[in-house]
Amino acid sequence: MAGRIRAEDIAAVKDKTSIVDVVRDHVTLRPAGVGSLKGLCPFHDERTPSFTVRESAGTYHCFGCGEGGDVVSFVQKVDHLTFVEAVERLAGRLGMELRREEGGSPGSQETVGRRTRLVEANRLAQEFYAERLLDGRPEGRAARDFLRERDFDRQAALTFGVGYAPRGGEELARLLRSRGFTEEELTLAGLVGRGSRGLYDRFRGRLMWPIRDTSGDTIGFGARRLFDDDRIEAKYLNTTETSIYKKSQVLYGIDLAKKAISTQRRAVVVEGYTDVMAAHLSGVEGAVATCGTAFGVDHIKLLRRLMRDEPGLEPARIIFTFDGDAAGQKAAMKAYEEDQRWAAQSYVAVAGDGMDPCDLRLRKGPAAVGHLVEDAVPMFEFAVRTRLARFDLSTAEGRVQAMRAVAPVINGIRDAGLRPEYLRTVAGWIGVEIDQLAAEAKRAGRSGDGHRRDPAPAERGPEPDSLEPTAAELAATLPRPDLRNPVVAAERQLLQVLLQYPSLVTGDDLVGLTAASFVAPAHGVVFDAISRVEAVPGMTLAGWVDAAAVNAPLSAQPLVTELSVAPLPTDIDPASGMPSRRYADSLLARVREVALRRQIDDAMALLRRLGTDTQSDPTQVREVSAALEGLQRRLAGLREEMS
Ligand code: ZN
């Protein structure tokens, strides 16, 4: 049958179907706490029931095998059906006639490969955005000004496919629906979200860069904030992880850079979309940038494949340009530690005055960008010199401290053949004997001060001098929250309350809490997804949970479902049908207390570092001290309330 099922019909099927009735066709259910039912899981063998259904949330989750979802996914899994078939089956149950979209492309929507559909949707979106940038409408002026101020002309915009996402919020969704794309395809492509009022464009009022894979297919977007009243604070937004867009594996500009990377056997990693544009326009054609994530091992693999990095050839080179900011340096250092073979081939280029390639081209001309890249120094030298810069090498004490600071870098060189050479070089920079430095490095190695000291991600808070990680970044490495930790257990209960009893907690209760306030990264991601749900009058609980799940990255969606059904370890007041307000308050206080304590630790660590830095700015020291006092006062106040 031609045409796609209308989105509103799919929503109606979900609304009118009782998940409990459907599950009961397959599973015998017994009451388990207020509003929950339990039974033996149809998806794995078990003797004691861990399969839980919550009628009001419209969701199910098995605590044994982790399967979970809504009524459509249940029917899909239990009957081995496609999405469309499952919806049709449920509609049949209700005696409902499903209406089809007219004018969709011929054939069933499942005959075309999913990837092809998602790529096509992204291609159309790119065309739409590009047209809105260049068609001269007044609304796109801010975007055009942004480009003009950085000396990017119309031709540059066309070359890089830059565009503008209008502020209306529904135009792209409407266009793509009229071209026959289903709601499911558009949400899976990351272009459109599903809210309580229907479909809405993910990107609104932003300058858009299409992110393409090596074959030139557009698979996602980077989007820059243009307007002060943009409700999304983040300066840059990226497509969330989709089946075709994996941020750990994409590099912006790779489609245009791959030829140069392969023939010159040199890749230049810059920090942003405008830097990629500026570098290419300045003749540095092997320039690429990561998209909303740090440079990692998968990126190395991608570049290596392009550079034919084989034995016998002269080593290929990867050059990083940094504007000198700590986060960028740290990212490259991390990749350096992870991949030693690559380490010897990596170089760092830092503009003397801290300018990035975009600034350099603008203020000093295209040739300056070329010079920046030519003057790159080996990563090892950069790493050591960055550390040495903190010490006064004119004093004996300073030299000893400097040796200790660089010892881990030297110990990080796993290639024993390279070590003597590096030791000699570094000893010279510090002004000590080679033997002295070798002894210091040996001592550092023995005391276990190697490069593999990081605790497991699960137990690690945000690193003191890293920028606060975005929810999407956290989602990429979501370890299972460790519930033996009582704080993590409290976080879980708080999220359960937010999902299951949203009316118990008001927006005011949550002021100041962010994803970073949570110890378990997965909990931070779920909190972020919940806090972005727009509540509207008449919203059902199922609608609420659904919206939170849609906001969450794919990897965190099962956890949202799980928390929407997991029973709370507290009494439910029979009159209100909710846990007590006191219970919610105690969870909130617990999470806040830990978040404050961690902020205090970070501030104290920063003060210590500033204390050791001979060039630290006294104003900054005063500001950090004042902030620390404020945090300590808030913690004291909170503890008083809790007692
Ligand atoms: Zn199961």
Image: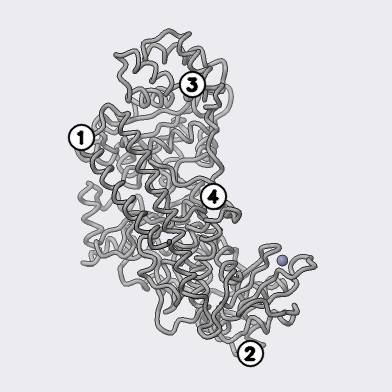
Q: Residue at x 60, y 74 (%)?
A: 59
Q: Describe the colour scheme in one phrase.
A: one colour
Rounded to the nearest angstrom, the CA distance separating label 2 from label 4 is 41 Å
Q: Residue at x 64, y 83 (%)?
A: 90
Q: Earlier in the sequence, mark 1 or mark 3?
A: 1
The crowding category of the residue bearing disc 1, from other C-alpha atoms within 10 Å (few below 14, some 14 to 19, many at least 20), is few
> Disc 2 vs disc 3: which is toward the camera?
3
Q: Secondary structure at mark 3?
A: helix
Q: Name the residue rendered at 66%, 87% in the picture.
A: 92
User: Picture coordinates of residue 603 (x, y %)?
Assistant: 35, 43
From the top left corner, tell me how far across and down residue 547 is, in percent. 48, 72
Of circles 4 and 1, the one toward us is 4
* Residue 466, picture quadrant: top left
Residue 45's label in the rendered image is: none
Q: Secondary structure at mark 4?
A: loop
Residue type beneath disc 2: Leu
Viewer-nearest residue: 26 or 323:
26
Q: Residue furthest bottom?
A: 95
- For marks 1 and 2, give the CA distance: 69 Å
Left or right: 12 in relation to 164: right
User: Badge 2: how crowded within 10 Å, few (<14), some, or many (20+)?
Assistant: few
Mark 3 is on which residue type?
A: Ile
The residue indicated by pointer 2 is 94
Q: Earlier in the sequence, mark 2 or mark 3?
A: 2
Give the mark toward the camera: 1 or 2.
Answer: 2
Report which residue position mark 4 lands on. 477
Q: Is residue 588 among what the camera can see?
A: yes
**Which residue bears the numbered disc 1?**
364
Foreground residue among 509 and 293: 509
- Spatial distance from mark 3 to mark 4, Cα to Cα? 29 Å
Q: Which residue is mark 3?
A: 410
